Amino acid sequence: MIDKPSVDWFALSPVLALLGASGIALLGAVLMPRRVRGPFAATVVALGFAGALTAAALVYAFTDEATSIVADAVRRDRFAALAQMIVAGCGLLAVGISYGGRRGGRVEAGERSDRRTASGGPLFGQVADVTSEYYALLAAAGAGMAFLVSANNLMTLFLALEWFSIALYILCAIDVDRIASLEAGLKYLIIGSFGSGALLFGSALVYGATGELGFAEIARVQAAQGLADDPLLLAGLAMIITGLAFKASAAPFHMWTPDVYEGAPTPVTAFMSAATKATALLLMLRLLTTAFPEQEDLWTIAVAVIACASLAIGNLAALVQRNVKRMLAYSSISHAGFMLIPIAANNALGGRALLFYLIPYAAMSLGAFAVVAARERELGEPVTLDNLSGFGWERPLLGIAMWVFMLGFAGLPLTGGFWGKFLAFSAAQDRGWTWLVIAGVAATVVSLYYYLAVVRAMYMRSGAELQLSGTASSVAAGGSPPREALLSLSVVAALIVTVGTFFAVDPVTELARDAAASLPF
Amino acid sequence: MMGPEINAYLILAAFLFATGALGVLIRRSPLIVLLSLEIMLNGANLALIAFSRRFGEIDGQIFALAVMAVAASEVVVGLGLIVAMARRHLDLDVDKLTTLRG
């Protein structure tokens, strides 16, 4: 018998469910008749995400003590399980948002904004049917994220990060007949790989300083050998933080975000803004607290500075945007700032705050982009504040939902965003960093302006203007706008989570507290 | 047999990484940019392998092998995108990718 590491299949089951769904969806692309490919792939991947959600919930329930599994490459704990539940939930909603736009191989009809197609002609004679591949890549990206949040050494970290990043590069560029989509894919690839390169070189330096790749071992060697001020280690730490900040789209590493969020297909943007940010931030929290407790006084300051920069740049740039997707991209940069505040606080309350905040944030972000996607399919052009007018009256459900999401982003009561910001600020206050709380509150006040601008655009227009913009275009597109049951269902689900986390704050905080307890604070 | 000290490897690795980073920042052809990204990753690989030899452990080298596989798949996606753009007769120049801005 050969010695082999014991593999805890149960703990890996969320990742395996998603990988399985991805594989089956890909097989469906060649085995199923053309007409049912789209629905088949969507169903399989939705089941995969639902399965991953259930599996992660079970892992959460049956994991009392954190353990390292699979030759210490992966950590099994409640932190990872809760993070996997968030990722799987995001994926499930993303499938619902995608479905209407990708039915029967038709590429996002609403998004073909550039007219330059005529010069080059269609790419492959006709637009290739990539529906199955789209859903397969979505599941593969989800699997990579679910793997990343349980990473326990630098190698697993890098591989999982690239795993979901490469899937996302393709997803961004999947509408090859749209120049904006290709451009978004290439920009994301170049800048994303630049960030990964920095992360990898940082990992190599940390390995060189300590001789270890595992998070806990890195901390142990540092403590044992007094390496806290080793220049190699500090350079490595700085590069790793840079690499992760690229993924979380925190300023000043955010340059790609507005372009990629605008150019990528809207459902992909929705998934990226929620799930990528969540996993990158959660991993940052795990890595910094587990592997670098010795440099605590350095990285807390660094993270706080990045948080302030993100708040300032995200909010100020969002003020002048007319394109709603771009505005939401800058808003997501500022939210990276809000969620870096609890990481900078580096206490148990901060861990709880981050995990709590991510749940309503993910729901609001997916929901807001879903509403944008609905409007985009109706109009056939990019959504701006101008052509959003009257939307609230035409589609009451989506209008009210968007209203709630915007108020939630701003952190007003009756949405989970309120408690998220409240907990994040309390964590900073606990550490004694009142200046960080003040920066956060100031950013919140500024953000109200552009969030309310969306609500104003949707409702506060006279009847005459309403006739001109909204209704006229949908008539031109041929009758009433398409009603998409699945998209509306996703929006309602996001709405329930957003509002639910306000009223059910105690049970959700308990979940987050138990999950954060697996990290060494 | 003794090779150069670890510092020599580290300096070369840092030089490669910096060359790659500079290439990504200043070159305009997406092909050269992809090439520069590879040089960055290989700088990191060299550092990993050198440290791995110094510690007499194998894990750094395994890491470097895995990175090579990842880098290859990244290039495949990048080249695919460049081919798709070339078929659309777009200029292969990252400074002219300005459909998205604001």
Image (cartoon, grey):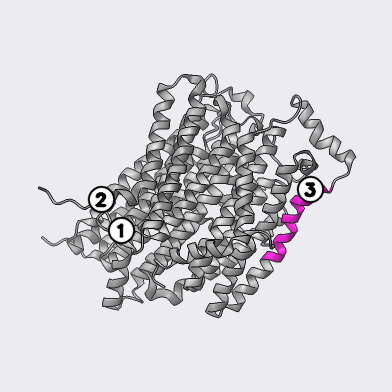
Visible residue check, residue B11: no
- The overriding secondary structure of the stretch rendered in magenta is helix
Is residue A446 inside the magenta stretch?
Answer: yes
Tell me the residue that label 3 is attached to: A457
Return the residue nearer the eye: A212 or A251. Answer: A212
Is A163 placed above or below A509 here? above
Is residue A291 inside the magenta stretch?
Answer: no
Q: In the rendered structure, the residue with mark 2 lies on which chain?
A: A
First in sequence: mark 3 vs mark 2: 2
Distance from Cα at disc 2 to Cα at disc 1: 39 Å
Visible residue check, residue A10: yes
Q: In the rendered structure, the residue with mark 3 lies on which chain?
A: A
Magenta span:
A444-460
Horizontal side, residue A16 vs residue B98: left or right = left
Distance from Cα at disc 1 to Cα at disc 3: 56 Å
Q: Quadrant of the N terminus of chain B?
A: bottom left
Indicate the amino acid at tag 1.
Leu
Q: Are marks 3 and 2 on the same chain?
A: yes
Indicate the amino acid at tag 2.
Val
Q: In the rendered structure, the residue with mark 1 lies on which chain?
A: B
Mark 1 residue element: helix
Tell me the residue that label 1 is attached to: B12
Q: Are marks 1 and 3 on the same chain?
A: no
Mark 3 residue element: helix
Return the residue nearer the eye: A456 or A313. Answer: A456
Mark 2 residue element: loop
- Front disc: 2 or 1: 2
Which label belongs to residue A7?
A: 2
State the residue at coordinates (55%, 28%): B88
Horizontal side, residue B76 vs residue A483: left or right = left
